[in-house]
Image (tube, helix red, strand yellow):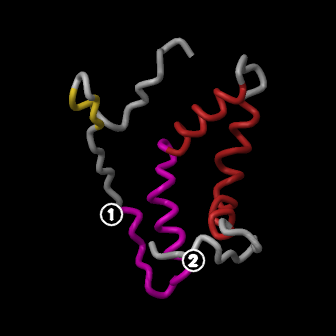
Amino acid sequence: MGCTPALGFVHSGNQQSFIYDIADLYKAELTLPLAFTLHNAPNPEQAARQRFREGLRLFRLMPRIVTDVQRLLAPETTEDQTDDLQEELVDLWDPVTGSVPGGINHAYDGGQ
């Protein structure tokens, strides 16, 4: 997108300031509910990573970030493009089995 990671608006003094600003836009929506679901997890750190990745996919966060950053930085030139977002999944490659469908959590074993 051409944004400089160090150019923060809220955070400053760090090479990732802009990244932290963007992360704050979604923190309450993603991480706070996640924290409350981990109270009985036998391995909360592992469960947090897995559930957070799943949350990123379910919330379609990456396309939202692009749209939100464009709206924040240039509101007068940004049209409402949320209806035009189309998910384009690509296949993964496994050296043994070849092409593997993308968009699937292949680590999920069904027992968790």
Rendering quarter of residue 14? bottom right
Q: Is residue 11 above or below residue 76?
A: above
Q: Horizontally, is 76 left or right of 51 in the view? A: left
Q: Is 68 inside the magenta-drawn segment? A: yes
- Other residues around mark 1 within 10 Å, as few (<14) / some (14–19) / many (≥20): few
* Residue wearing tag 2: 72
Q: Position of residue 63 (x, y in %)?
A: 44, 59
- Tell me the kind of residue under disc 1: Asp
Q: Is residue 64 above or below residue 60?
A: below
Q: Position of residue 102 (x, y in %)?
A: 32, 37
Magenta-highlighted residues = 57-83
- Other residues around mark 2 within 10 Å, as few (<14) / some (14–19) / many (≥20): few
Q: Residue 109 versus residue 97: which sits nearer the camera?
A: 97
Q: Horizontally, is 74 left or right of 22 in the view? A: left
Q: Residue at x 33, y 51 (%)?
A: 87
Q: Is 48 inside the magenta-drawn segment? A: no
In the rendering, which numbered label is found on residue 20?
Answer: none
Local secondary structure at mark 2? helix
Q: Is residue 8 above or below residue 60?
A: below
* Residue wearing tag 1: 84
Q: Residue at x 48, y 43 (%)?
A: 57
Q: Residue at x 47, y 68 (%)?
A: 67
Local secondary structure at mark 1? helix
By secondary structure, the bulk of the magenta-drawn segment is best described as helix
